[in-house]
Image (tube, helix red, strand yellow):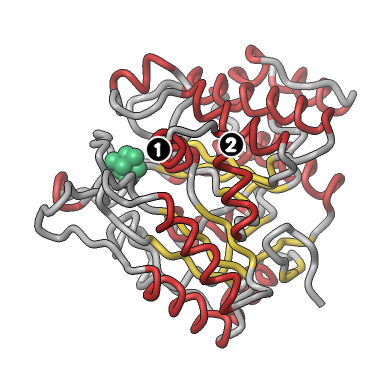
Amino acid sequence: MVSMEAQILDSGARLDFDRAMTLYESADLWHLGRLAENRTLSRYGRQVCYSVNLHINYTNVCRFQCRFCGFSRRLRQSGAYVMTVDEVVSQARAAQKSGASEVHIVGGVHPELPFEYYKDILKGIRQACPNMHIKAFTAVEIIDIAEKRGASLENTLKELMAAGLGAMPGGGAEILDAQYFQRVCPNKPGPDKWLAVHATAHQLGLMTNATMLYGYQETIADRIRHLLQLRALQDESIRQNKGKFLCFVPLPYIPPKMKTGKKCAVDAVTEMKTIAISRLVLDNFDYIKSFWPMLGVKSAQIALCFGANDLDGTVQQYSIVDKGHNDNADDYLSVEAIRELVTEADRIPVQRDGLYQVMS
Ligand code: SF4
């Protein structure tokens, strides 16, 4: 059966749901890996990109209590924090001084932060660091901002873009399935709304990214349907030729230590299969990201041989999951360490900017 999928891929045809299921459920990890690696090498070559970036999580206060989330706190709960606009801007300024070209800004859905807070972050960074690419605010944050000010998604995105928004991250997609959302994050805007925000952003010419949280109460079929929905939206966005998804980021679920005592919920074989199947199904995405803060550095490196061609970046700080899971000692990888990881995997490290342009 598996060789038939290989023939389909060789012919240039797309993997449909059934074929993707067959490959994902196959015990032959190496065959799947070779198919994905060959797809990456033949279409995109040996280059693996990374960025010198800084992740900023401006608040952990969130009015949604997704069941898998160990990051969020309720308003005024112990451990809750909100960064001031000045604190966010000064972190971006310091990152620029140390060579960063991109900031990645996401946070919880804070019930009280006004629209001006988000705009002031963008304007402040734009003023302090004119060349810094600002990737900020997931779809769920954008929906909340729009609802709070009683404006449309389109108008809200336009204002944020005018203030300096350069791209959107892909978080909050979880598993794009209404029943899954009902079960796992019932209060959060559902999958149709996540897709609508990204479709609207693309129509406005804004580049975005997409994620999938796997390993938390979903089935393999759910994951494949998630990928197929992203592929369909990307087809439409490419057809319109304004904005599109830049990369896809599969995120393995990491249980909060405080709740479970466990460090890892997803085994390495599933991680590699998920990277590989993502590469094969998402034939209209240029980049599949091996996100080392959640995969762990060693798995992230191996994933480069299973179809991934983006290693994210230096990151510097990452509060979304607990530290110490997998083999990650901290939240920072130096450029030298990233380049060595890529080179040891027999790939060519290439520094990119926030829109995936190669930097000299
Ligand atoms: S996953 Fe995001 S939306 Fe859900 S509770 Fe955590 S911070 Fe809030």
* Left or right: 1 in relation to 43: left
Looking at marks 2 and 1 on the same chain, the residue that comes earlier in the sequence is marked by 2
Percent position (x, y) of residue 242?
80, 39
Percent position (x, y) of residue 336?
61, 82
The crowding category of the residue bearing disc 2, from other C-alpha atoms within 10 Å (few below 14, some 14 to 19, many at least 20), is some
For ligand 1, the image quadrant comes to top left
**Label 1 SS:** helix
Question: Which residue lies most toward the bottom here?
Answer: 97
**Label 2 SS:** helix
Q: Quadrant of residue 208?
A: top right
Q: Nearer the viewer, residue 138 or 143?
A: 143
Percent position (x, y) of residue 232?
70, 22
Question: Is the CB of the residue bearing disc 1 within 8 angstroms of ligand 1?
Answer: no
Q: Is residue 237 visible?
A: yes
Nearer mark to the viewer, of 2 and 1: 1
Task: Write down the residue under mark 1.
Answer: 144
Residue kind at label 2, given as amino acid type? Leu
Task: Write down the residue under mark 2.
Answer: 29
Q: Quadrant of residue 178?
A: top left
Residue kind at label 1, given as amino acid type? Asp
Quarter holding the N terminus is: top right
Q: Nearer the viewer, residue 76 or 53?
A: 76
User: Residue at the spot x=64%, y=15% of the render?
Assistant: 17
Q: Is residue 25 above or below residue 78?
A: above
User: Residue at the spot x=61%, y=83% of the render?
Assistant: 99
* Left or right: 187 in relation to 49: left
